[in-house]
Image (spheres, rainbow, N blue to C red):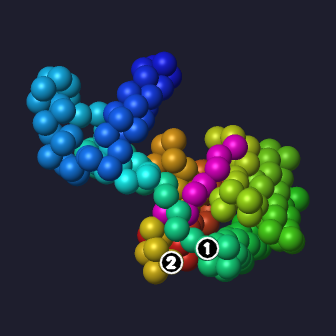
Amino acid sequence: MFAGRLLVRLSRSRACLATMGSWSKPQALANQMILSRTPPTSTDAIQCKGSIANRRFFSSEIETESTLDGATYERVCSDTLDALSDYFEELTENAAELQGTDVAYSDGVLTVNLGHQHGTYVINRQTPNKQIWLSSPTSGPKRYDFVGTVAAGRWVYKHSGQSLHELLQQEIPGILKSESVDFLHLPYCS
């Protein structure tokens, strides 16, 4: 599977380099596919003017391109982690069935200890990658990229398409059985 994807990428790069400057947008792609009788892959090069712009043919593909500059990333990330920290504190304060819980947020690292039986969630910023990383005792580690605009964006795990808030909404109600849990009302989960 990996070798197949690599070959597709290489063939696209060669075609792009060979025709650099003479590529005429979608029509050239259509002509190439008709002549070679090759169905389109999920992403095909549309334009070659120094860089390759990819076009999505299938809606099931996940866009993970983040256009956040450094300052905007810091603000969005801080807003997300602050809101999660506050919400986890509220949930654990009211959870009588959980013993030994602790929520700590410092230097971009949110640690949610849900007791010995349920384990610890760690959610932290990764500034060089412009990501948020999650370590879940239930589902393991994941890296989330910000997708969309600041007004309507969310943190998405590119391998599954599931957002950070959706994962927490899936896992936490099983732990806090007596609480009503709604992570989907927090910022950056749209």
> Where residue 115 sits in the image (x, y, percent)?
83, 53
Q: Secondary structure at mark 2?
A: loop
Q: Which residue is mark 2?
A: 150
Q: Amino acid at mark 2?
A: Val
**For the stretch drawn in magenta, what is the main secondary structure?**
strand
Q: Quadrant of residue 155?
A: bottom right
Residue 155 is covered by the magenta coloring? no
Closest to the observer: 53 or 103? Answer: 53
Image: 8 above or below 46: above
**Residue labelled with disc 1:** 69
Residue at the spot x=75%, y=68% of the render? 92
Residue 47 as seen in the image, left or right of residue 146: left
The magenta stretch is 141-147
1 left or right of 126? Answer: left
The reply to whether residue 157 is in sight is yes
Report x, y in % for residue 124: 76, 61
Instruction: Say whether residue 182 is visible.
Output: no
**Toward the viewer: 40 or 131?**
40
Asked whether residue 146 is drawn in magenta, I would say yes
Look at discs 1 and 2 and give the one toward the viewer.
1
Q: What percent of the width, then of the height, locates residue 144?
A: 60, 55
Examine the rendered structure and indicate whether residue 80 appears above or below residue 52: below
Mark-to-mark CA distance, 1 and 2 = 11 Å
